[in-house]
Image: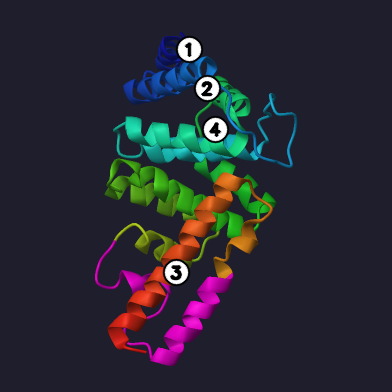
Amino acid sequence: MYSWIFAIVVFYFTRSFVASILAFWIGRMIDSGSRNGGARTFHRPFGPPHRVSPEDFELHLLSLASLVIKADGQISQTELDYVRNYFVRAYGKDRANATFRLFNEITKTREINAANITNILRQRTRYESRLQIIHFLFSIADADGRVSELEMRKINEISNYLGISYPDFESIKAMFFQDADSAYKILEVDKNATDNQIKQAYRSMAKKYHPDKLQHLDEAHRRGGEEKFKKVQDAYAQIRKERGF
């Protein structure tokens, strides 16, 4: 029921076919969520579990996710499912559904503004958490097996707004774009770096991406942090194997 209502309302206000498709699928996810069984709720330092305010973190996160999903003009069901499952794991089914409902109500009256959203997040979150947001957005884009150029540009734009440094952005990007230099990019070192410089870079990156830095976040976000940490370890292991040290 929600899916068609949201799609019609969004199209009426925006005259955007792409936006109406996105609304349809999010509505469908809400319908599906209300029919499915319970999900585990993880600890969160915010308000009541069944009520979401426009200031809540997950609403901002969903807004940024929607910008990435729409970036290339193709609404991927795989990407939508990834977001849906991520939110249910992180916040539980009821709060995830409440977030989706409020998101749709807000987008009826105003357009999502990346600069405004990221300005709020930049003020209220730690740098390590903002790095995890960028990793999350890349994971969404990669859910269908390919990060398009337009999706990458949108994530780069959001990264700039969030105050993420260029080396850190390129490091996370290299975790999803594999080439001969990916391992070096992940460690934020030049391919001509000495063995000692690489060891130093690994220690620095391991400290930056260590999961302990994300203990204040929900389990789903910490899991993403563990993925980044593993990529750093894998990159270092690959370089060590290539160089024989």
For image coordinates 46% across by 12% down, the residue present is 9
Q: Range of the magenta residues?
A: 178-207
Q: Earlier in the sequence, mark 4 or mark 1?
A: 1
Q: Which colour scheme is used?
A: rainbow
Neighbour tally class for label 1: few under 14, some 14-19, many 20 plus, Cα within 10 Å: some
Frontmost of labels 2 and 4 is 4
Report if residue 41 is visible in the image.
yes
Q: Residue 197 lies in what quarter of the image?
A: bottom left
Frontmost of labels 1 and 2 is 1
**Residue hosting label 4:** 88
- Indicate the quadrant containing the C terminus: top left, top right, bottom left or bottom right: bottom left
**Residue hosting label 1:** 2
**Residue hosting label 3:** 232
User: Alpha-carbon distance for marks 4 and 3?
Assistant: 27 Å
220 relative to 131, above or below: above
Q: Which of marks 2 and 4 is nearer the N terminus?
A: 4
**Residue hosting label 2:** 104
In contact (CB < 8 Å): disc 1 and disc 2:
yes
